[in-house]
Image (cartoon, rainbow, N blue to C red):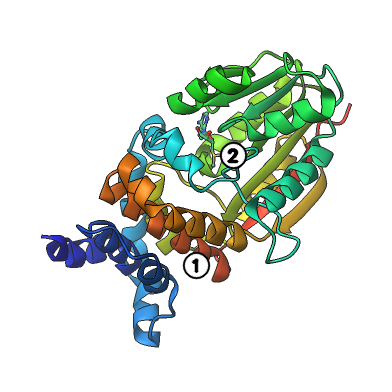
Amino acid sequence: MRAAYFPLETFIYGISYAWLKYLIRSPEPLDPNYAWDAVTRDSPPVLDWFRLNWPIKPMRPLVIAAKMRQDHALGIHAHYDVSNEFYKLFLDKRYMFYTCADFHHPDETIEEAQQHKADFILNLIDPKPGQKILELGCGWGAMLKRIEEATGTKENLYGLTLSQEQVDFNDQHNHYNVEYADFITRAYPQGQYDCIYSIGAWEHVRTREIPQLLDKLFAALKPGGRLVQHFFCRVNDDIFAPAACAQIYFPGSMGSSYRFHAKAWEDAGFRITHRSVHDYRLTLRAWFDNLAANRERALEIVDVATFNRYMTFFPASWRYFNDNMGMVTRWVLEKTA
Ligand SMILES: C[S@@+](CC[C@H](N)C(=O)[O-])C[C@H]1O[C@@H](n2cnc3c(N)ncnc32)[C@H](O)[C@@H]1O
């Protein structure tokens, strides 16, 4: 049965998508060494050509349009509401960041690298005690925690997420003002926030939703306030295979290109005062190694298909960055007074 899907999915979505789905459908938990190699090894040139050129260009918008009919909130639920215990098996222990860390050296631990990232972004946010700060897509509250450590206040810190498990985690452990809400469609009070930021959530916002959302965020900031963004984007607009594969892991989400974002900030009225590019690969490898090391416990928490999904997600993402199809970017966007 598993083999029957392969040609069909290759025809519709391309061979990368079909191969990842074939691996995920393995009835056995994937062996880590096999999984990493099966996803990241170089293909022979003919296969590589096919990987990048099939489906043909006229088919691509139809494929993506069909996938974009999937409900955004359900897609977020599918990825993030797996189990908090499962995520604890591979994320850093102190903060539980589920976003690219800053490895200053390849032999650093994920804990050290996430601390560097938290400090880097803290510097971009530059929070002062009592300032009203909102995180879009706050995950398990990692960056809110870092801001609280720096300022000593928490009642002014707000977060939004579409994961009920993350809301429950916040209610049990952190007690920030975290709300289950869609940051794309919700309304914001005008001129209220000193800073709005997101780390690894802007990838979920579809291109056509960005201009209107930026207008709302611009209006929600106080004069002189800032929008701080950390997310990954496509290097250019004409990349199909990763966009199709992303639907396996984030159904209904669709990122945009670097060029699109750079223009969108300025069209919304922001002044770009910082931009930098970061390397996701060591973080992905660290999460993969942690999950592999905790394989037995993971399989007590989730089913084989879910375990296999993550065993392919990390190497597939690694390859996306290694092939220079996507890049992690950070931006500070000021609403000049
Ligand atoms: C990759 S996680 C990053 C979490 C956290 N910022 C971190 O650095 O660990 C993405 C987060 O964005 C949230 N998210 C994605 N789309 C959302 C939306 N439309 N509204 C609210 N939250 C959203 C998810 O629920 C999740 O918490």
Q: Is residue 256 visible?
A: yes
Q: Quadrant of ligand 1?
A: top right
97 horizontally vs 122: left or right: left
In the displayed structure, 130 sits above or below 98; it is above
In the rendered image, residue 242, in percent from the top left (x then y), is placed at 44, 60
State the residue at coordinates (73%, 46%).
115
The quadrant of the picture occupied by the C terminus is top right
Residue hosting label 1: 319
Q: CA distance from mark 2 to mark 1?
A: 23 Å
70 horizontally vs 132: left or right: left
Callout 1: SS: helix
Q: Is residue 240 visible?
A: no
State the residue at coordinates (62%, 17%).
175
In the rendered image, residue 184, in percent from the top left (x then y), is placed at 53, 28
**Ligand 1 closer than 8 Å to label 1 CB:** no
Residue hosting label 2: 96
Callout 2: SS: loop
In the displayed structure, 255 sits above or below 215; it is below
The residue nearer to you, when weighing 217 against 27, is 27
Outermost residue on the bottom side: it is 45
Among the 4 quarters of the image, the one containing residue 50:
bottom left
> The residue under label 1 is which amino acid type?
Arg
In the displayed structure, 60 sits above or below 253; it is below
**Ligand 1 closer than 8 Å to label 2 CB:** yes
State the residue at coordinates (42%, 68%).
36
In the rendered image, residue 62, in percent from the top left (x then y), is placed at 31, 52
The residue nearer to you, when weighing 32 against 78, is 32
Between disc 2 and disc 1, the foreground one is 2
